[in-house]
Image (cartoon, grey):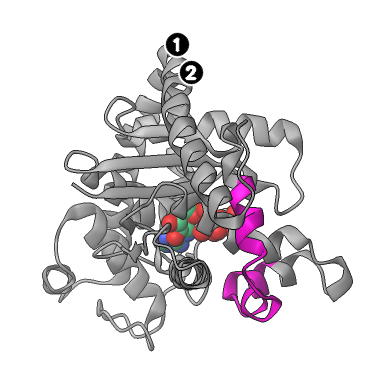
Amino acid sequence: MKKIISGLQATDSLTLGNYIGSIKSLVELQNENNLYVFIADLHSITVPIDPKDLEKNRKSIVCLYKACGLDFKKSKIFYQSSIIEHSHLAYILMCHSNLGELNRMNQFKSKSLKQSNKTETIPTGLLIYPCLMAADILLYDADIVPVGSDQKQHIELTRILADRFNKKYKSKIFKIPEFYPPKIGGRIMDLLDPTVKMSKSSENKKGTIFLLDKIEDIRKKIMGSKTDSLNKVNFDIENQPGVANLLTIYSSLSGLSIKEIEKKYINKNYGDLKKDLAEIVCKVVEDIQKKYNDAKNNKNLDKELKLNSSVCKKEAHNKIKEIHKILGLEYEY
Ligand code: AQP
């Protein structure tokens, strides 16, 4: 049994990319492992967000976790902000990181460009994001971290920070976690620009499928997705990125291999592929939405969150006490 940790930001409703790249694997892993899944609400304030939206999104994500199949009794599901040890450890790790390595993070580069074109006004939260993410992971001695491939660089940095800390203080306080991408769908691309990742915060919402989109809108988004003029259903990321993306989504949700799908559409056109894919995606999302509505009326979810939170809090608190001892900050509180 492995200890597994992952979280999703509450900047907006979740996307199909979040589902395929993260939640789906978590649901598959929850039976055999010790799972910690949080709503990354502290990560959400690294960019400007209206408190009312944040409040609404974080509640909605709890219900989406449930609707996607996460079991609140089997897994420890909690709000990141309910355990202040996350931000405390993030501060300690920040003091063991350097500006150069944080500056090199691809996510920092792309998100800061979206926020500002002047260095002075880039939100510092974006720069220190990977330290908070490292804290989320190292606080609970996670063995593996199932995330999409956009997060690989952050996991590598987490490993570096953990190893640096262990060596500096000649301790084994931090377990070195492993990156665990999904077998397929580690990077679902935008439907209108298949060279960039499908994201909650994309400007053109027509390229992103949200799990709470109207079903008819999802169908339209898939039918309007960008392909190419070759009209050959073929998995070639370099020359046919749009089609490759549709095939990846198809494979992840249907369980068919890419080869099987290519064979199925050998004498068919992109319209056929899109129509069938829309059917598959809409069926999955429709099911999630039905369960989401049930979850919204489930009064027990809040109680379960609090229970999970108190268990994690104890664990996190003990870990911080050990870290304080190593740093010469020991004090009973
Ligand atoms: N397009 C994607 N394909 C596969 N996996 C993805 N993930 C995100 N987008 C894709 C995975 O979802 C998990 C949670 O991500 P997050 O919410 O913490 O933040 P993110 O990676 O920055 O996701 P977004 O949707 O792009 O959010 P915004 O727009 O707010 O930045 C991670 O495991 C991630 O890999």
**Whole-percent x and y of residue 6?**
41, 49
Local secondary structure at mark 2: helix
Q: Amino acid at mark 2?
A: Asp
**Whole-percent x and y of residue 232?**
26, 81
At 18% from the left and 46% from the top, the residue drawn is 1
**Whole-percent x and y of residue 28?**
22, 46
Is-magenta flag for residue 109?
yes
Q: How many marks?
A: 2
Q: Nearer the viewer, residue 260 or 78?
A: 78
Is-magenta flag for residue 249?
no
At 52% from the left and 72% from the top, the residue drawn is 168
At 60% from the left and 33% from the top, the residue drawn is 332
The crowding category of the residue bearing disc 1, from other C-alpha atoms within 10 Å (few below 14, some 14 to 19, many at least 20), is few
Question: Label 1, label 2: how many angstroms apart (C-alpha)?
Answer: 7 Å
Question: What span is colored magenta in the figure?
Answer: 87-111
Q: Which residue is mark 2?
A: 302
